[in-house]
Image: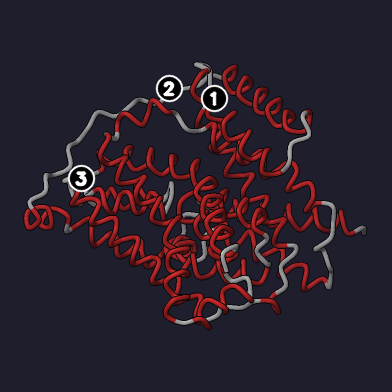
Amino acid sequence: MSLLVASLSIVCITLTVVIWLEKQERRWIKALLQWVPPILFAYIVPAVLSALLGLQLDQVVLHQWSKQWIIPIAILSIMASLSLRALKIVGVRPLLLFVFGSFFIALLPVVILMTGGWVSSSFQAEFISKDLWKGLVPIVGSWIGGSTSQLVLKEFVGTSEGLFLSVLVLDNVLVNIWTLLMFQLIKKSGSLNTKLGLPEAPILETEQTAIRSTKDRFFTVTLLAIGIAVPYLFGLSFLQTIIGLSFLGILLGNRLKAWDHQLCLKIGSFSILTVMAILGLKLNFSQFELPGIFVLFVLVWLLLQFVFSVLTALALKISMVWVPIASMANLGGISTAPAVTAAYDRKLMPHAIVLAILSMVTGTFWGIFTTWLFKLYLATL
């Protein structure tokens, strides 16, 4: 059996297992997926199977196909899933809180590294000499944009496989803990509003999602397929492809009436699982590393962005309920943001979903911004 056939078989098995797990209603499986999400299973299972079979699959052509085709498909689909009209249900000030939250997430790792360098040169040298800073950029993508941005930025900045596994594990643990904390915060937001003199969150009208026909779905898939071919017709680089398809996706999703946003989101989600499964073929568990200084850095980063978000909410004079909603839209994503919001008021769930989707489509750009800041700072040393 050729290595390509073996790698394709492992990826297909992985996707089958992950999709099966996602559909299960058993309580213990749901509890397991709370701590080890499907996206992490998709990354680990191929590595386990490759190791058991004694196969070295880190050089198969599947990795090239993933970068050239599947990642662009994911980007175009996710970007095309955002309806800009839906943003009106959120309101200006919650949107500002969300955007400032994203900005702090993208800016703080560079600020912390700079500040740490003034306090201890060894702290800074650790992150630079071992390229640990390259593990921070995918975290920006993960926190703001989710798995799509995380994978794109991993490839963009060149994060090592061992460090990327550390990022996945650490990010997963922290986000689960953070979700529990945000559940508690949103339940107490009413009393916090009273103490701080802030207004309660208004319940706004929600935009109804249109039911799409088979013709609309066929039209959507056809244009997505044509869109994927565009970068290769013009010979664009990986970065140019990502940026170009991002803008193309927004254009398609907001200028065409017969557009199926939900289908785009499903295609994007499946593409990301596929990319993770292919990346898992490269994973070598002996490369796993989790430096204590890296963990400390991320914890400080997480807490500081929350402090700045609270201060922003106070400055904007909006309900504290928007802090956990915006925070989970940035750090949790499309699944946890509405879940946390429901603990306060189910009528606010559409607002959380819109912010989560907005987070998904902007995460890559924030990660590129962070990378630019890092390189600008490193050039001065």
Tell me: 22 left or right of 242. Answer: left
Q: Residues within 10 Å of mark 3 (few under 14, many from 20)?
A: some
311 w.r.t. 78: above or below: below
Q: How is the image coloured?
A: secondary structure
Query: Given the image, on which type of amino acid does mark 3 rest?
Result: Leu
Local SS, label 2: loop
Q: Residue at x 60, y 17 (%)?
A: 215
* Residue 133 tag number: none
Q: Quadrant of the N terminus?
A: bottom right
Q: Residues within 10 Å of mark 1 (few under 14, many from 20)?
A: some
Tell me: 57 left or right of 160. Answer: right
Looking at the image, is mark 1 or mark 3 earlier in the sequence?
A: 1
Question: In this rendering, which labeled residue sits more in front, label 2 or label 3?
Answer: 3
- Outermost residue toward the right in this view: 1
Residue at label 1?
251
Query: Given the image, on which type of amino acid does mark 1 rest?
Result: Leu
Query: Given the image, on which type of amino acid does mark 2 rest?
Result: Ala
Front position in the image: 64 or 298: 298
297 w.r.t. 327: above or below: below
Q: Is residue 120 visible?
A: yes
- Find residue 219 and report its horizontal and vertical position in percent: 62, 19
Total labels: the figure holds 3
Front position in the image: 264 or 287: 287
* Residue 316 tag number: 3
Question: In this rendering, which labeled residue sits more in front, label 1 or label 2?
Answer: 1
Q: Residues within 10 Å of mark 2 (few under 14, many from 20)?
A: few
Are the residues tagged 2 and 3 within 8 Å (C-beta)?
Answer: no
Residue at label 2?
210
Q: Quadrant of the C terminus?
A: bottom right
- Find residue 320 and report its horizontal and vertical position in percent: 19, 52
